[in-house]
Image (spheres, grey):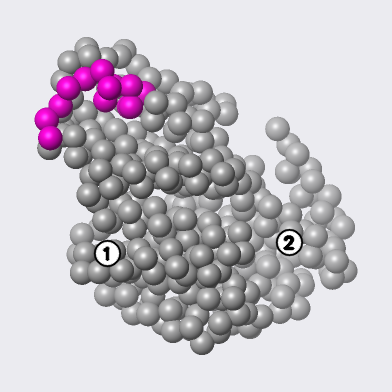
Amino acid sequence: MLRRKFVLGLTGSLLTLPPLPEAGRLGMSDVGRIQAAVGKLHKIDDRHGGAQLVDAAARYIDHVEDAARRCTYGSNVQTHLYRALGEVATSAGWFAFDAGRQEIARRWWDAGLRYALLARDKRLQARIWSSMSHQAYVLGHGGEAVSIARAALEETRGRRDGQLSALLHTRVAQGHAVQDEAGWCARSLHRAEQEFDRGSSEPQRWLGFFNAGEVTSAAALSFLDLGQHAKAVDAARESLRVVQSTPLRRNEFAARVRLGRALVSAGELEEAMAAGNDALTLLPEVNSPRVNRRLKQLRDDLLDHGAPGAAEFSERYEAVATCP
């Protein structure tokens, strides 16, 4: 029988996720319920960030694993169940990463890789490696970021579409940028643009966030790392232009902060302040400690550069950031 409901508490609201049987036999409809739950979690993540979802996702994984232990199922359902569990674990890792809980993110991605291997799903493995490569980049481990992304490219050779290829090549590019390898970075960015233009014959739901703005955001961050400030500003502007036309509010928040950082690096302090203020208006609805740390750094940079109005901006930031 189905549990009557599976309700998770989030800040200011409740999230009801699809239940699974407590006993009996699992079927493909149950796997579909798990996938629907992942979709619900990511809708919240897209709009508000993943920080508040870390514990919710962990509890739901326990719920699914408990049902898998208690119930029976055929080999076909088993494969799809492993894939679904891998997807939930991968999402839990992303939510933890967005919350700045890096060790927890790694543990969930390790769990996701185990399920992906059991499901023999190379594309799910590539998705996890993409996240792990991005984490390595954020932590400043450029060589590791490149190696992980290249492993994903190798394992999915002949199995991936343009969209996934583009994502993985942006990961390679950013790893090279951290290591100040401008030539290799430029080649990888060019390859990412080519692959993105090739498009996707079979769109994957989890790649819904990866639009042209994400390609240019990777370029902007790479140019920042390489000290190519004018290029960083141009790429950041283009990224924001694309992202602000989508419902991805957390990504728009990140894009506005990114533009502010690029403008500071280029010495355009007045416009950087405006970008920071635009980002600040989104802060109350986005719970992403990862991006908020970058906004705080932008605030500090504006103060350090003596930008006109920086003190007032800092006061506004403190008021909004500390608001319950």
Q: Secondary structure at mark 1?
A: loop
Q: Quick check: can you spot residue 237?
A: no
Left or right: where 101 falls relative to 1: right
Choose top left, top right, bottom left or bottom right for residue 139.
bottom right
Q: Amino acid at mark 1?
A: Thr
Residue 103 image label = none
Can you identify the residue that label 1 sits on? Answer: 156
Q: Considering only vertical position in the picture, is 259 above or below 67?
A: below
Can you identify the residue that label 2 sits on? Answer: 298
Left or right: where 157 falls relative to 287: left
Viewer-proximal residue among 88 and 52: 88
Task: Tell me the residue at 32%/27% (across/down).
Answer: 64
Horizontal and vertical percent position of residue 115: 31, 42
Report the magenta residues as a range. Answer: 63-75
Viewer-proximal residue among 297 and 123: 123
Q: Residues within 10 Å of mark 2 (few under 14, many from 20)?
A: many
Q: State how far apart marks 2 and 1 are (Cα).
A: 38 Å
Residue contact at pointers 2 and 1, CB within 8 angstroms:
no
Choose top left, top right, bottom left or bottom right for residue 259.
bottom right
Quarter of the picture holding the C terminus: top right
Reply yes or no: does residue 286 show up in magenta.
Answer: no
